[in-house]
Amino acid sequence: MDLIHNLSIGMATALQPGNLFYCFIGTLLGTLIGVLPGLGPTATIAMLLPITYSLEPVSSLIMLAGIYYGAQYGGSTTAVLINLPGESSSAVTTIDGYQMARQGRAGPALATAAIGSFVAGTFATFVIAAAAPPLTVIALKFGSPEYFSLMVLALITSVALAHGSILKALAMIVIGLLLGLVGTDIYTGAPRMTMGYLELADGINFVAVAVGVFGIAEILRNLETERTREVVTTVVTNLMPTREDLKAMAAPIVRGTLLGSALGILPGGGAVLASFAAYTLEKKVSSTPERFGHGAIEGVAGPESANNAAAQTSFIPMLTLGIPANPVMALMIGAFIIQGIVPGPNVAAERPELFWGIIASMWLGNLMLVVLNLPLVGLWVRVLRVPYYLMFPAIMAFSAIGVYSINTNIFDMYSVAIFGGIGYLFYRLGCEPAPLLLGFVLGPMLEEHLRRAMIISRGDPMIFLNRPISLTLLLLSVAALVVVFLPSVAKKREQVFVEDD
Amino acid sequence: MKFNTKDAAAGALFILLGLAFGLHNYLALDIGTNTKMGPGYFPLVLACALVILGIAILFHAISTEDEPWGPVPWRGMFFILLGPIVFGATIQGLGLVPALAIICFITSFASYRMSLPLAIVLTAGLVFFCVAIFSWGLGTPIQLFGPWMNVVGLGN
């Protein structure tokens, strides 16, 4: 009953014309940047974060959330039509989706992705609604040691599940943590690692770092090899899947939805991991695994459901605990803070209309996305024909306005250039930017809870092991680390990622 | 002999960064005690971890095959990174319209395919679009023309 009551509060908020409008704008933008390779939700949300300042809190969060899950829909269109992941989470969709398109079945492939995403989105909305209240209750019991251990777990799992070298990802986290600590120490007021710059007293601007390492570095990556994209010239006809298609996609959609929902809740998880895991699962349970790679509809249905489910359930740790599971959620926390709301267990109790409004808007957003993506697919194909050299000056202009308008501080513009350069350098050295950004956000929180815990325990580090919840979280972190370093798992992990590159 | 230059460079960079952060924290900040951690405590721990990770990556480099570095987009890097710097240097003096025009124009040339007429058209279009959305639509409080534009009678 509570669930229905809560969701109806949410629906009432989400259905207000203004919020409906921003939900639409968010999903529209999400689809657009999802379709366009080379511009992801992280950079987009970072750029748009400052302008949400002038909006109502609910509207701005509904819009930003729409960008994230909308991008999961848009990404599949590009994957199917031009064999390029529009979004990293649709990388596996290129394998079978593009093959289906080559066999003249682009329509059913797109429809499968949309239906799967919609089912997953609906289910995930209910998962959030059902899981959030109990988690909020648990979270209220959390003290500093528990928060510290939870953040350690989030950081470790984000590495375990990342693409590429684990050691490098760990190092990127540490650098992120260090960069996050730049600025005035809250306990003593001492300036730390500011190199004498007064502008750094409040720390390095988070949005500047996000735009730099995700937006600018990505542009530089794309400029390495300027190719013309080959857009499938055939007009997409016959979107309706056949009866056999529907039958074949049903089970994978269910499996993908469940798997994605579970992996999204995990701290450090998210859409990318979910899609890879779902593809592997589908291949494993299939009685005809040899069809995979040659246009198997299961290879589209599973991953596309999973990435959408995970994109949505990854809101759970952020909404209930105030802990970001991935860089996008870190930006969402930034959006909350801009609005003067501290994300955490109190939000649900103090601002129910906001909390449940965001959740309810996700389902409405999913409904809009089906309409935006299927009948309007022709429009997105045309968007794909826009050459990249016309796109990146626009990205640069938006970034400039976005970053500058946060504090109207010139120094932030220099940070963008510096972090763009640094982000690209790290990319060239084979290091992913996501762990750095996650570390950057968690750095100050991690230190604060560590120091508080140590004050409580009078300097005894055993406090982290004596408290059952904290101990469990730390044991899970150790287990995650051990597992990824096991030779057999390490090999498998490489295979999963390599075969789809 | 196996030697991965990419990993080696990454390892060396991490070690250097770790040493720089570590020394700074050790010399300039109060470390404190376990109970009452000073501002330098946690950063110093992190810096040590970074050095250790850097060493491990360096060792890993010796046992893995080298991989190709690929092309470096020097031209792209120059124009793309120059854009925000020039925007930052001019936004308060010139105002939003000229600074936007400058960043669009400069970054356009990051691509080999850009031509002068196309860059001009693109810049004009983008400036109009951004001003329409951000200044007129969303009311972003950045002045359109700054004090330096008084010379031509546009500033305020």
Image: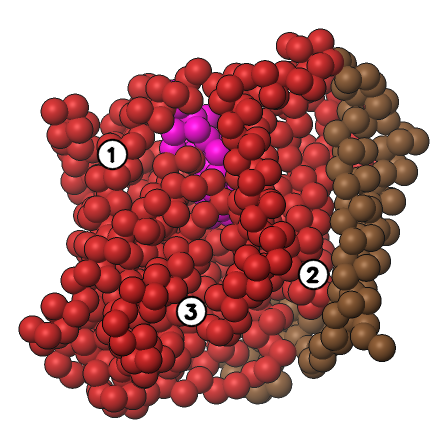
Chain colours: A red, B brown
Q: In this picture, is A103 found above or below A129?
A: below
Q: Is residue B149 magenta?
A: no
In which image quadrant can residue B85 be found? bottom right
Marks 2,1: beta carbons within 8 A: no
Where residue A171 sits: x, y (%)? 70, 49
Decide if residue B44 is on the left or right side of residue A386.
right
Q: What's the residue type where badge 3 is placed?
A: Ala
Q: What's the residue type where badge 2 is placed?
A: Phe
Callout 3: residue from which chain?
A
Callout 1: residue from which chain?
A
| Residue A16 or residue A251, whichever sits in front | A251
Decide if residue A339 is on the left or right side of residue B59.
left
Decide if residue A295 is on the left or right side of residue A375.
right
Q: Residues within 10 Å of mark 3 (few under 14, many from 20)?
A: many
Marker disc for residue A129: 1
Q: Which residues are magenta?
A: A319-346
Q: In this picture, is A146 found above or below B15?
A: above
In which image quadrant can residue B18 be found? top right
Where residue B63 sits: x, y (%)? 78, 67
| Residue A355 or residue A161, whichever sits in front | A161
| Residue A329 or residue A382, whichever sits in front | A329
Farthest residue, direction right: B27
Marks 3,2: beta carbons within 8 A: no
Marker disc for residue A91: 3
